[in-house]
Image (tube, grey):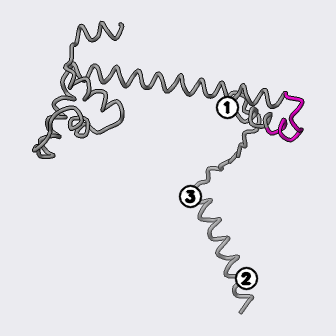
Amino acid sequence: MSKDKVKQIHPLTSKQEKFIAELLKGNSASDSYRASYNAKGMKASAIHVEASKLKSNPKIAQRLKQGYKRKEEYAQTSALSLRHLVLEQLQKEALNPLNNESARIRALELIGKTSDVGLFIERIETTTKDRTPEEVATEIETKLEEILATSGQNQ
């Protein structure tokens, strides 16, 4: 559904539009209210109440939801574009015969470290052995006896 059709179905006032735009910028509801409406002489609590009412308005809530969704989609596509650009440039650096050997190797290393390739990922393996309480108690007793025996020799 196009932006114009949404506006036709859910018309908002210019102040409501400004309120939504301020929220989408990351401002708090109260700050967005102050930027959009004449809040002179209003207590902070009254501004908070009015801003909360506006946010809960079904038309505004729906438009906010759409706005946040668009921001998230843009952020994802932007991040993917930057990732693609970086990998492309690293590939050019790695294959450029005019670069010195260490620069080419470093570019290849960085490409290899990306999650897509995953060549240089350090893995630490840990193994655990489940022991019974009796085994643990026996081990503790043995260690204590060793400690007591060595401390007895030092005296």
Residue at (65% x, 50% y) in the render: 129
Query: What is the crowding at mark 3: few (fewer than 14 residues within 10 Å), some, or many (at least 20)?
Result: few
Disc 2 from disc 1: Cα separation: 52 Å
Give the mark nearer the N terminus: 2 vs 1: 1
Asked whether the beta carbons under mark 2 and mark 1 sit within 8 Å of each other, the answer is: no
Mark 1 is on which residue type?
A: Ser
Mark 2 is on which residue type?
A: Thr
Residue at (62% x, 50% y) in the render: 130
Residue at (11% x, 43% y) in the render: 42
Left or right of 106, for residue 139: left
Which of 41 and 52 lies nearest the eye of the viewer?
41
- Provide the secondary structure element on which disc 3 rests: helix
Q: To which residue does mark 2 refer?
A: 150
Q: Which mark is residue 133?
A: 3
Q: Give the residues drawn in magenta, as a range.
A: 96-106
Mark 3 is on which residue type?
A: Pro
Q: Position of residue 48 (x, y in %)?
A: 17, 40
Rendered position, 36 above or below 48 = above
Which of 29 and 37 lies nearest the eye of the viewer?
37
- Provide the secondary structure element on which disc 2 rests: helix
Left or right of 25, for residue 133: right
Q: To which residue does mark 1 refer?
A: 115
Rendered position, 77 above or below 123 = above
